[in-house]
Amino acid sequence: MNSKKLFKMIAVLVSAGAVIAAAAALWACLPWLWRFFFDPAAQQQLSGWLASFGPWTFFVIVALQVVQIVFVVLPGKPLEVAAGLLYGALGGIAVTYAGVLAGTVLVYYLSKRFGRPLVRRFISEETLDRYTALTHSPKFEPLVFLLFLIPGTPKDVLTYLAGLTDVKPVRYFLYSSLARVPTILFSTAAGGLIADGNFGLSVALILVVGALGAAGLVFHDKILSRFGGNENEPKKRP
């Protein structure tokens, strides 16, 4: 076996192991995640754990955000709320934005370098097929900005897909990151309210975000139906 085949085999095994581990961790953490979204005590517990890293807390949050973007099945909202708890609404945006931008750049270039075989390790073939026509649309960039702006849409999936297109990286990093700011602000503001003792208002804000996310998923599906082409026609691979 030559070194190139060995490298590919190791990459496949590592990727598969990482995906399985992430899925298992998500399954094990589901009860806790449910508590986190609606129990201020659980939210403070996470922020307390993060704060225990002292001056390294900023870098820990950034690193966890990067991991969350790479492994698309992991939710990012708990980290955003925790950032708001520790740094307030605006400070939480700054630390979250740093992690989001770093994760976006990493995923984009991983996708660009290793192509569809790598992307399939993190995203199902069915999901890729749903977005194929959209990636070839001349309106891809404004549509991606719109999808990133809407709460509840699978933003990290779109980052993997962007690496399979000819979109200019700097432009993509700019508008995709900026479009995330409103939804991140909702989450960090909820964390800031918890830090101020406004638990009821925080839960209400989280519920509003959840409702907007549900509506966003419906709108997201309509965009895919409108610009995703005819499901009965053969689709080009991105």
Image: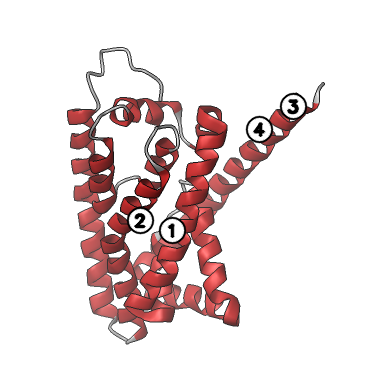
Element under label 2?
helix
Give the residue type at disc 4: Val
Residue 177: give its label. Answer: 2
Precedes in sequence: disc 2 or disc 4: 4
Q: Residues within 10 Å of mark 3 (few under 14, many from 20)?
A: few
Give the residue type at disc 1: Val
Q: Where does residue 151 sit, x and y in percent of width and height? A: 26, 54
Label 2, label 1: how many angstroms apart (C-alpha)? Answer: 7 Å
Would residue 151 be found to the left or right of residue 35 on screen?
Answer: left
Precedes in sequence: disc 2 or disc 1: 1
Label 2, label 4: how many angstroms apart (C-alpha)? Answer: 29 Å
Q: Where does residue 159 sit, x and y in percent of width and height? A: 41, 43
Q: Residues within 10 Å of mark 1 (few under 14, many from 20)?
A: many
Residue 100: give its label. Answer: 1
Residue wearing tag 4 = 12
Question: How many marks are shown on the rendered structure?
Answer: 4
Give the residue type at disc 2: Ser
Label 1, label 4: how many angstroms apart (C-alpha)? Answer: 25 Å
Residue wearing tag 3 = 4
Element under label 1?
helix
Q: Where does residue 202 sit, x and y in percent of width and height? A: 27, 75
Quarter of the image with the C terminus is top left
Name the one closer to the observer, 220 or 142: 142
Precedes in sequence: disc 3 or disc 2: 3
Closer to the camera: disc 1 or disc 4? Answer: 1
